[in-house]
Amino acid sequence: MVESLEAMLTSLLILLTPVFLALPVSFAWRWWVGIEPEQEHYREKVRMVLDSGIPLSRYRSELDAEARKVHLISDRQARIESDLLHPLRIQHFLLFPSLVLWPLVGLFAAIITLPMMPVLRLVEWILIDKGILSLVARIIQQYTRWEVIGIPRLGEGAKELDKVLASIHRMPITVFLGLFAYLIVSYMPLSSFNVLLLSAAVYIVLVSAISVIRAATESSLTFADPTNRRLIPMDSFVEDALGPWVGVGLLFLLSRQLMYGSSIRTGELFHDPVAFSISVLLVLYTATIIGITVEIVFFRTRGGSVRQTFQLQMVDEFDPMVYLFTRSHGTLRISPLIPLSKWIEQREEFDFTPDPN
């Protein structure tokens, strides 16, 4: 009994190690972004623009002038803007130790990543080229009676670092899906090797599908719910649908595995709670390296094409309008701009000068 309790406590400490490591990293990140008075001043200026609902591109010259006034270099501007657009939280900092452990987990990540690339292309062909994702959007629209419109993304015109932070901001769901697949498959009556093999196969399919969907919806496309007075960007709709299920599922599966121990755990690797906890961390950090690879190989090379193709399919399906959703002196206004088709033709650029009337 005492040995069992010690093993339980040890396994909990192992699982909590990423949290302990994440706390100093989060403080270091906050300092790196900027905490000096002049940096906080610029942060407030950027926040005022974002609060107004106007993309940063509209006030790019004014923001640059403000930065020069308080002697901020371009890199510091990029950090502050990116931190406001894509804030990093504890779940992001949990993944940072993988950068140290990549020589250990890199080989496993490479073994999984290589077959993932053709699967990604296959899923893209099914969901985008064959129009399955647009059909799903049509079904959602018919079921909910929402309208499909366009709202310009506030991050347009942000400094270059924004792309890096956007990648990091996307990664937790990609990574935690790997851990989710591993914990689900570990319940099956399989050997340790077969559990790892099947987990990798399930993870490849899940990440391929989710990556294509997220790349396609990362645009100005928005669901408008007039009944409940809501605007729901499509990418937020996907995140909100996935995040809670993955998060709650991980907590449930981890706690159940640790509470019931070997009575539900199969294979030599899963019999010992300490060995199981170590395997969870190895899976977590391996999935992080895979997530980085997906960001570089897929989102950087195919993301733009997937997004544009899906937007054009939405134009054919709904012929939506692009609206400017702004706030000024406590007054909210939704102003029609141009059809989404024309918006795409103009490379998503428009004169956002506020209407004086």
Image: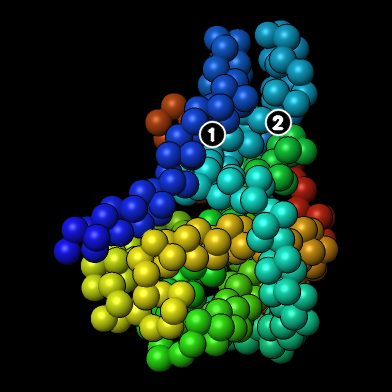
Under mark 2, the amino acid is Ala
Locate the N terminus and report the quarter of the image it occupies. Answer: bottom left
> In the shown orientation, is residue 342 left or right of residue 79?
right
Q: What residue lies at 23% left-to-right and 67% top-to-bottom?
A: 259
Going by the picture, which residue comes out furthest to the left?
1
Disc 1 element: helix
Q: Quadrant of residue 100?
A: top right
Q: What residue lies at 60% left-to-right and 16% top-to-bottom?
A: 39
For label 2, the crowd category at 10 Å Cα-Cα, with few meaning under 14, some 14 to 19 and many 20 or more, is some
Front of the two marks 1 and 2: 1
Query: Exactly how many numbered labels are in the figure?
Result: 2
Residue 308 visible, this orientation: no
Q: Position of residue 210 (x, y in %)?
A: 59, 72
- In the rendered structure, which disc, 1 or 2, sits on the residue that comes first in sequence? 1
Q: From the viewer's perspective, is residue 268 above or below residue 247?
A: below
Q: From the viewer's perspective, is residue 272 above or below residue 44?
A: below
Q: Position of residue 143 (x, y in %)?
A: 40, 82
> In the shown orientation, is residue 217 left or right of residue 17?
right
Nearest the eye: 289 or 106: 106
Nearest the eye: 308 or 115: 115
Q: Position of residue 211 (x, y in %)?
A: 64, 69
Q: What residue lies at 45% left-to-right and 57% top-to-bottom?
A: 231
Q: Which residue is mark 1?
A: 25
Q: From the viewer's perspective, is residue 221 above or below residue 318?
A: above
Q: What residue lies at 59% left-to-right and 45% top-to-bottom?
A: 96
Disc 2 element: helix
Residue 78: which disc?
A: 2
For label 1, the crowd category at 10 Å Cα-Cα, with few meaning under 14, some 14 to 19 and many 20 or more, is some
